[in-house]
Image (cartoon, grey):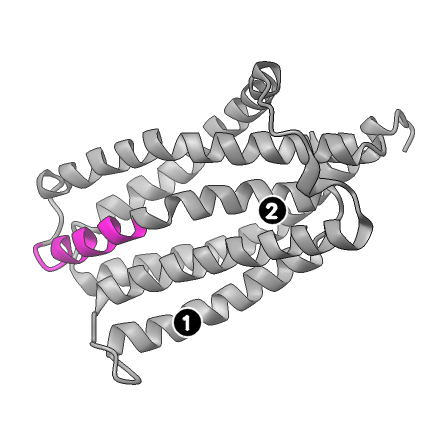
Amino acid sequence: LVSQAHGAGDHRDCHRWLVHGVVMGAALTVPIIAVCLGVLAFFPHAGFHPDVAPLLDGYFGIVLWSTIPLLLYAAVRRYLQGMHVVAPIAFALVTANLLNAAANWTLIHGRFGMPALGVPGAAWATVISRVYMLAVLVVAAWWIDRAGNTGLTTVSRTLSRERFARLWRLGFPAASQVTLEVGVFGLATALAGRLDPVSSAAHQIALNIAGASFMVPLGVASAGAVRVGNRVGAHDPQG
């Protein structure tokens, strides 16, 4: 929707979609955390390996705190991406990974006078990196608006039921497909949690390698979606 508005040269409409995306992301935080808390309560009955179960509980409960910055980051990221502003997104992702690695090293093992938190330290590193990604993109959006004087800070905050309905109609089928796809891997990971810690870790490494290769077609698909939306907004079917 942002890419179509951008293709039509309507910056204020891009801003309006950002406002509604941010509000929807914030609103969805509540039911998503509720579902996750239900999953967390189910952990003791899932048959996890006795050495794995305490680690899961300590990690999952902390990572939940990163839900709202992650959803808000997604909204701001799509807004910038839809307007062909991708350099700040790439910068945020690369530097957030570096920050995450440094925070893991510091908090897990207790460097620079910090206590050694173990697995909860890894969870807090994830929370920190997600808050950082949101902060970088918010600053980028503000900076770009300031440079181009596009009216982001003065755009109407009035919420439209029709805009939320369009977001839902377009987003829910896509979200359902992603949920099913990610859910299969999540289920496989849950089954791996019944194994010993080393086997579970090996499974996670294998998934990370598979995920890295998946990023290539995902990136091409995202770029294609933005370009198509841009030409649709410009009423240029040939383009």
- Crowd rating for badge 2 (residues with CA inside 10 Å; few <14, some 14–19, many 20+): many
In the rendered image, which residue does mark 1 sit on? Answer: 101
Quarter residue 197 falls in: bottom left
Tell me which secondary structure the magenta stretch mostly adopts. Answer: helix
Report x, y in % for residue 23: 50, 32
Q: CA distance from mark 2 to mark 1?
A: 22 Å
Front-lying residue, 199 or 231: 231
Precedes in sequence: disc 2 or disc 1: 2
Residue sitting at 37 percent across and 50 percent down?
A: 66
Q: Residue at x 72, y 34 (%)?
A: 14
Which of the image's four quarters has the C terminus?
A: top right
Q: Position of residue 1 (x, y in %)?
A: 69, 29
Q: Residue at x 40, y 54 (%)?
A: 207
Question: Do we see residue 229 in this rendering?
Answer: no
Q: Position of residue 51 (x, y in %)?
A: 10, 60
Front one among 221 and 162:
162
Instruction: Identify residue for label 2.
Output: 77
Q: Amino acid at mark 2?
A: Arg
Give the magenta range.
50-63
The amino acid at mark 1 is Ala
